[in-house]
Amino acid sequence: MDTANTNEKFTIAVIGGGAASVAFLHHFTRLVAPSVAARIRIELFEPRPSVGPGLAIRLTGIGKGSSDAYDYVVNATGSAKDIDSPAISPLGWQMLRDGLAAPDWRGGIQVDFDTGAILERSGEPDWQLRALGHITCGAYFYVSSLEMVAKRARKIAGDIVSALSENVTLRPLGKVAA
């Protein structure tokens, strides 16, 4: 992200229409400052995206279908913890195939416990990619509890708002980006 350009626009894709996406959007919109909000475009998508090479995500949006690039992606697609096939979770399956995510032996994908950042096949967290809900069942115990999903959503929303406010690449607070 170019820190010199304070008018830079940011796009956030929120995938899913259930409790996790609602909780994320609720906390995000409450935390973001008006000066930062003017630079953000949030799009909500149905939970059946298809993924191209890298992280070119083609999503069927509410009222549109397109291929766009996003600065941040929040996967809040609901109860799919098994992502072994594209029929169950196209986004999760493609991310596993491309090495952008690693399966967790307990189910779902591996995430950084403190931040919800998705761990790549190499084991390194990708601070730009976060996950909520059942897909994180290997890291968190109460992934069905709306209260716990809302708590994780609040943390992720806070991290994104902080990064946007500071014009820095998303990273957890207190950690230095390499």
Image (tube, grey):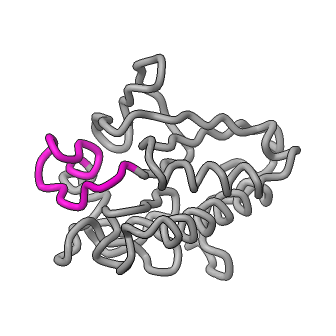
Vertical position of residue 153 compared to residue 141: above or below: above
Residue located 33% across and 44% down the image: 54
Comparing 47 with 3, the one in front is 47
Residue furthest to the right: 35
The quadrant holding residue 123 is: bottom left
Name the spot of residue 5 as percent of width and height, x first. Answer: 80, 43
Q: Which residues are magenta?
A: 77-94
Vertical side of 54 occupied by 129: above or below: below
Image side of residue 22 versus residue 48, left or right: right
Residue drawn at x 43%, y 52% is 76
- 26 in magenta: no
Q: Position of residue 153 (x, y in %)?
A: 56, 62
Q: Main secondary structure of the magenta part?
A: loop
What residue do we see at 71% from left, 36% from top? 9
Residue 100 placement: quadrant: bottom left
Position of 24 compared to 87: left or right?
right
Q: Which one is nearer the viewer's eye here, 74 or 18?
A: 18
The residue at the point 83 percent across, 44 percent down is 6
Against 177, residue 10 (above or below) is above
- Horizontal and vertical percent position of residue 4: 81, 48
Residue 158 screen position, x and y as percent: 68, 64
